Amino acid sequence: MALTAILLLGGCSYSQDALWPSVGGDRVDIPPSKAEMADPILSPTQPVLSSGTIMLPELAPVTDTGTAVGQKVLALRGDLQQLRSGIADRNAQLQAVRAEAGQNALRYHGTVAAITTKLQLGTTPANPVLVSQWNQAQDLLDRLSGQVAALDSLSNAVAADSSLANYLLDNARTIYALPGAIDEDHRQLAVLEDEINGTIVVLDRLLTELNEDVNRQSNYVASERSNISTLSAAINAGTMLGPSLQNRSGYASLAGAGFAVPQPGGFADTGRAPLVVIRFDRPNVPYAQPLYNAVSQTLEARPGALFDVVAVASAQGGAGQAALNQNQSRRNAERVMRTLSEMGLPANRVALSSTTAQTGTNEVRIYVR
């Protein structure tokens, strides 16, 4: 692959190609990606919920004609009236859920914007103020998820109402065939049939809106779950990262692609240059932002890219030291894997393996497939 880079940040270095900037000394110069420059809020705009309000016209009056058929018409109208009252209640519930979801979304995005603004200005790792704000954002996102469940429940209830309305329509058509009716019975029955049909049309429209709301909100919440996980990683690192890797344009459709995990026995070096080399030569190596930038830009160029995370243990020292190096290197690689997961890279796109090399310190190398 033509995408390789060398970035050096304290203990981090990366290979270089035309895609990546050159580096000197201990300084890393990485231009911000378009996503990082575009908007301080990590998530897409809150989807607009449907705004339809149920407007059912009044039912026409029905008089008792004194016939057996007339009694059935009256009973059928009573069933329809009860159904329509239930529809009005569901509509009131729907408008309440929509209003609450809109308010929670505004508060959520405001909280996330406050966090990202502070990260862009610079802050300390795991700033407790930002952690508290992140917890508030997580709580608001949980509420939005609960409102998706409420919309889904309403959708099921409206679907049941639609089935009942169709059952009433079948009954109305059956009454036509009953003997002993007078002309007024059939006239009132025809009006009632039209009113049932109108109710079915309203229910179909409402069900369509609800299903669209559920789909939009479900996708939105899922996307924000991934973004807020990446935001947590950014807070822990004390630096601005960007949107979740999982939400990168052109990447989501490939997120489920299969990945052949290497077999035990170590990493087979095929001559590939590593995309990223992280040297763990001191505690708390600040690798999160350079790692995010490298992987993010790789996915922009190749949305289907897969990654190998290789724990490279230093072979220097005696047998005891080598064993310690292998254990430490493996832990470092697992930590990098967790960071990539927090950034939104699914586990089936990353494979973990290990090897040894004549290096001065333990390393973790990331290769692109």
Image: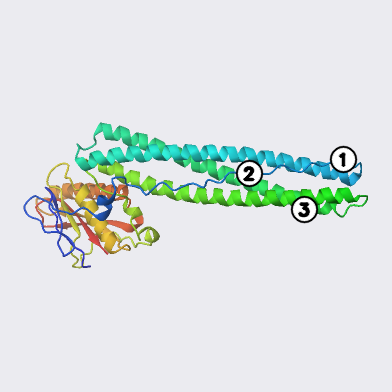
Q: Which mark is residue 64?
A: 1
Tell me which numbered mark, 3 or 2, is placed earlier along the sequence.
2
Q: CA distance from mark 3 to mark 2?
A: 24 Å
Residue underneath mark 2: 55
Give residue 358's quadrant in the image.
bottom left
**Which amino acid type is marked by label 2?**
Met
Q: Residue at x 64, y 39 (%)?
A: 88
Q: Residue at x 11, y 59 (%)?
A: 22
Foreground residue among 199 and 262 = 199
Tag 2 secondary structure = loop
Q: How would you rate the neighbour count of disc 3 (Cα within 10 Å): few for under 14, some for 14-19, many for 20 or more?
A: few
Q: Which mark is residue 170?
A: 3
Q: Residue furthest right?
A: 180
Tell me if I can see residue 346 in this picture. Answer: no
Q: Are marks 1 and 2 in contact (CB under 8 Å)?
A: no
Tell me which numbered mark, 3 or 1, is placed earlier along the sequence.
1
Q: Nearer the viewer, mark 3 or mark 1?
A: 1
